[in-house]
Image: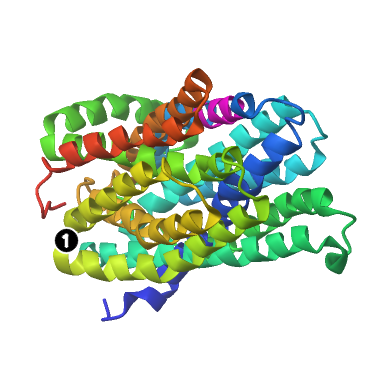
Amino acid sequence: MGKTPLFRRPVFSWALYDWANSAFATTVMAGFFPVYFKQYWNAGVEATESTFRLGVANGVASLVVALLAPVIGAIADKSGARVKLLALFTVLGAAMTAGLYLVQQGEWLAAALLYAAASLGFWGGNQFNDSLLTDVAQPSEYELVSGFGFALGYLGGGVLFAVNVLMVLNPGAFGIADASQAVRVAFVTVGAWWLLFTVPLLLFVRERRAEAPLPPAQAVRAGFRELAGTFAHVRRDRTLLWFLLAYWFYIDGVNTIIKMAVDYGLSLGFEQASLMTALLVTQFVGFPSALAFGWLGQRIGARTGIFVAIAVYAAVSVYAYFLDSEAEFYALAVTIGLVQGGIQSLSRALYGRLVPEGKAGEFFGFYNMMGKAAAIVGPLLTGTVAVVTGDPRLGIVSVVVLFVVGAFFLAKVPAEPRR
């Protein structure tokens, strides 16, 4: 391995998948879908009710991913098909995202179902991309390479989102009738972007296989048998168990803020254009910050870097209760951008050191299962608190408990775990 692994063809192609699918995370998940869901597909519905529906849509999608992730991961390991399954979930996610173009005003249930299916494609593709980190990099490179992937993700997602925002603000310049149609066209551009930039990974990334791949039917049977052993391994390995519990809580807080931030801003009466600008700020701040966290993680350790990010997130959640102006929302967007990529990339790198050889798909299935199982709680928590209290500010503050509990369990993980 050379001194600079980032531009080796497999590493760069792998990192481009973050560039590819971050368009969904930015334009759809964090950007236009919450706005369009509230103002177009839920036109005439109370703000608290549409927030609850959005929370349910996110929660259901997370539940499906949580149930499927370890099963498909184990099957992928036995069949040597992690790259193929990544391609399958990518096609699902891209197609369902583009399908949102066809949903008419008021059809909130159809929009929620397509969004849930697209989210399944997004998280399924992420699971296999995460697991391929151990195939394209050496353990000493995990923090740097993982940070590089997230950095490209923030940049790629930000570039397309900037174009999509311009489409909405000035649809005539793009030959589009109005802002509403521009949002629908944006969903199609996300699907195309996602597919296009997945191609290099399919061409240049190869799995390292600890054993000969099995035929599909045998792989399914062996994958289910392997799951029982995996559960037993997780129970025995205290370091792995503590990390998964920590990740379960703190990444749920992160994902909840990503998914609900725009909805929260709308509930406070902030202008849609200002919220989109804040998201762009987060993306472009996140690009250098993710690279910096990758470098920092190599020097102070991934666990310490995660603690720093958790502390910032907890402070942001508390301060969000007191937001009174769009300027303060921008300040929070910058703060989140400084740590969002870092907590994600260092978590992936730290977990990569704990994964047994030859079981990356299966164990990263557990990684995704824990994150998504907890993500059932976060969006439902914020939505339910907002409905019950009539105050969306209390909903966002409730996320703090997820960061506190996550930090508690992370403290039980050794500072320098070894694979």
* Magenta-colored segment: predominant secondary structure: helix
Residue 313 image position (x, y, % from top left)? 33, 48
**Magenta-drawn stretch contains 53:** yes
Query: Tag 1, which secondary structure?
Result: loop
**Magenta-drawn stretch contains 92:** no
**Residue highlighted by disc 1:** 301
Evaluate whether residue 219 shows in this view: no
Residue 185, compared with residue 42, is above or below; it is: below
Residue at x-position 51% and y-position 48%: 86
Please, which residue is most extreme toward the front here?
324
Query: Alpha-carbon neighbours of circle 1 within 10 Å: few (<14), some, or many (≥20)?
Result: some
Q: Amino acid at mark 1?
A: Gly
Instruction: Please indicate whether residue 263 sits to the left or right of residue 40 in the image.
Output: left
Evaluate whether residue 367 shows in this view: yes
Count of numbered circles on the image: 1
Instruction: Please indicate whether residue 405 sits to the left or right of residue 38 in the image.
Output: left
The residue lying toward the viewer, choosing from 383 and 367, is: 383
Residue 298 image position (x, y, % from top left)? 20, 67
- The magenta segment is 51-59
Please, which residue is most extreme toward the top here?
388
Instruction: Please indicate whether residue 104 sits to the left or right of residue 243 in the image.
Output: right
The quarter of the image holding the N terminus is bottom left
Residue 99 image position (x, y, % from top left)? 75, 41
Instruction: Please indicate whether residue 143 sits to the left or right of residue 219 in the image.
Output: left
Residue 392, compared with residue 97, is above or below; it is: above
Please, which residue is most extreme toward the bottom here?
3
Residue at x-position 29% and y-position 43%: 359
Residue 251 image position (x, y, % from top left)? 35, 42
Residue 404 sits in quarter: top left
